[in-house]
Amino acid sequence: MIKLTNRPEFLFSLFGNLAKLEGIGPKTTMHLGKIGILKPIDFLYSKPTGLKVRKFVKGVAEGNVDENVIVKATIVKHVFRKFGHPSYIEVRDDIGKFNLVFFNAKRDWLVLNFPIDAERIISGKLERFSNEFQIIHPDYVQKLDEINEIPKIETLYSLTKGISQKLFFKSVGKALALLPKEINNVEWINDNRLSTNGWVSFKESLNRLHNPLNVDDFSVSSPFCLRLAYDDLFSHQISLALSRNKVRQANKNRKPIIGKLSQLLIQKLPFKLTEAQVNCIKEIKTDLSNTKRMFRLLQGDVGSGKTLVAFISMLFLAENTGQCALMVPTDLLAQQHYSNLLRYIKGMGIEVTILSGKVKPKIRREKLERIKDGTSQIVIGTHALFQKEVQFKNLQFAVIDEQHRFGVKQRFDLIQKGDSIDILVMTATPIPRTLQLSNYGDLDVSIIDEKPFNRKRIDTAVISETKIEPLLKRLRLACKRGRQAYWVCPLIEEDENSELVALERRFLALKKYDSSLTVKIIHGKMSEEEKNESMQSFAAGEVQVLLATTVIEVGIDVPNASIMIIEGAERFGLAQLHQLRGRVGRGDLASSCTLIYSRNLSSSGRERLEILRNNDNGFHIAEEDLKMRGGGDLLGSQQSGVPKFRLADLDLHLDILTWAQEDARRVVTDNPELKGIEGSNIRLLLFLMGREESLSLIRAS
Ligand code: ADP
Ligand code: MG
């Protein structure tokens, strides 16, 4: 039994260059690349979007308008007309006469291809024009013995400029011919699934998907379609199961967790933990104490208090001289977590280090040294935390904050950093069930489903930019009373400078309105120091209005700030607006959020903003947004690292997804190294689906 570890040679042509397919040159390759067709196999995984069924008729009079007919006819005469008018060819079938119409066709070409009195088999869409039947630009005009060249059923595909339906369809046929005989007798689906569903082989299913025999074959619930959807999902679930297994294999050797420092921190808090926080901490503590490794997602709406859960969890290990890393998306957030944590653990004797953008090389070297010898027990930073030069003495726990873009590939990378590192990923982005199964099936999930009790609802208003005067008045009054506000300006064009211009303009306008207002600016183009400086003086209460771009979108926490004003609100996504709004309402103060829309906003645009006004639950907002936009994806799959399924459709194939997960988990539990015939068959599937990357998880063990 050969154990596949590399792509087998018999798949090379399917995964090779497109140019190997006849009829595909460099230009066509370029066009195909735009719709994701890079290799011959990609043709096979392009699901047809429609069907063209052709019907034999003795004469077109038997057919209906808009039907595609195949008919034998004799050429009667040519009618050439002046430029701007179509030429036509009159033909006669067994019942009567009709016309073949051509726009911009060369006379010579018509004469050559339609000799008078010749018999031809013609196919095309039947139309009626001033009481005569006609076919405009027939798809096929064949000699009598070439009748079989006309497909009775032809699958249609979504195309792109420069790619014709005919070329695509033919290429699919050629790619099908590349499916090697070596896969004929290979089956990775268990007998039971196959027989109860009446599924046939992978190869046969692909053949029928692209060459359906009838309309039923084409339906999304045809056994061919379902089997292929299963293959797509199953191979992905195998990857997830391998990743899950790899995580669970690790055998941690930890001292028992007492949790004295965590307790101390909790006692120092000026508020009580919510029940949801307590439960999540409990789940995490159990995982940390376990010999198996933790791989957990902590999900909670913005403001639900995830950071604190992370801090408390880290102390469980720091107390026993283990090291912890907290990774965040921006330096700004690293700085904030750093100062908060310092405040919380003062006097506990735990050393915290921040590794951020710019520090003098000497200081950086010292920091790295203290991480390496284990003196620094908690390290906070951006993704730079996982660079090679950062070496830990005893890294036990990695927390990844605000990670919406956590793809399978990044998880593989992270898992391989060390065998016994526990991992907690925190996100505010709601994850629907399908996505949870499809993308996070290898993670355990903890959910913070309540907000701290002292939270008041954020009073949200939607106003036109023409009503900005009264808003300024209220803002000035509130600031006089010691309130603090964020004022967010949008990116106007895809030009980085435009947002700076918008900030500058707003800054001058605010100063002109009331020169005694203290206003500071913060944006992505500033240096780390400048950003920190603005942020810290705002946090310290020295600044009344923080004029910002979306750099403050994620994670920023200044409890005293209670006013959020967002200009050009219609330019933001709803989820993003919800995140921004979540920057206020964090303390005891009643908070407000004002969404300012531009003069010419459509009524549906306004309605979209109203969703936010009526809703303060991130999950509902995402759902409503989805409904309004109609379809699409909740997270924006581009962003979230969610895999793209080409043969499966998560909206239609939820039960198949569930089966795929069940089967994959069973296989990987019983046969973790994918050995023997079963293993080899599944390995072949992974190669066919381009998901062989996950095999590295077995190899490394
Ligand atoms: P997020 O879940 O959005 O990351 P944070 O961790 O930033 O939320 O917490 C928001 C704010 O709420 C912080 O100021 C934090 O100190 C505070 N907080 C956290 N837990 C509680 C609680 N149980 N009661 C009151 N305030 C809390
Ligand atoms: Mg946070």
Image (cartoon, grey):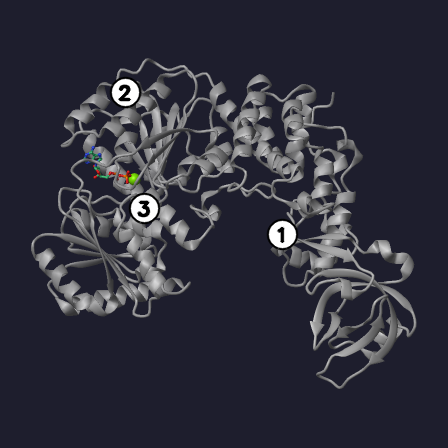
Q: CA distance from mark 2 to mark 1?
A: 59 Å
**2 and 1 marks in contact (CB < 8 Å):** no
Please provide percent x and percent y for residue 203: 73, 37
Corner quadrant of residue 666: top right
Residue neighbourhood size for the residue with mark 1, other residues' Cα within 10 Å, grouped as few (<14), some (14–19), many (≥20): few
Relative side of 471 to 532, left or right: left
Image height check: is 453 above or below 144?
above
Q: Amino acid at mark 2?
A: Glu
Relative side of 549 to 420, left or right: left
The residue at the point 40 percent across, 39 percent down is 431
Mark 1 / mark 3, whichever is N-terminal: 1
Please provide percent x and percent y for residue 513: 14, 68
Q: Which mark is residue 319?
A: 2
Residue neighbourhood size for the residue with mark 3, other residues' Cα within 10 Å, grouped as few (<14), some (14–19), many (≥20): many
Judged by depth in the image, the label closer to the viewer, 1 or 3, is 1
Q: Which residue is mark 1?
A: 49
The residue at the point 79 percent across, 77 percent down is 88
Which element is circle 1 on? loop
Image height check: is 430 above or below 417?
below
Q: Which residue is mark 3?
A: 554
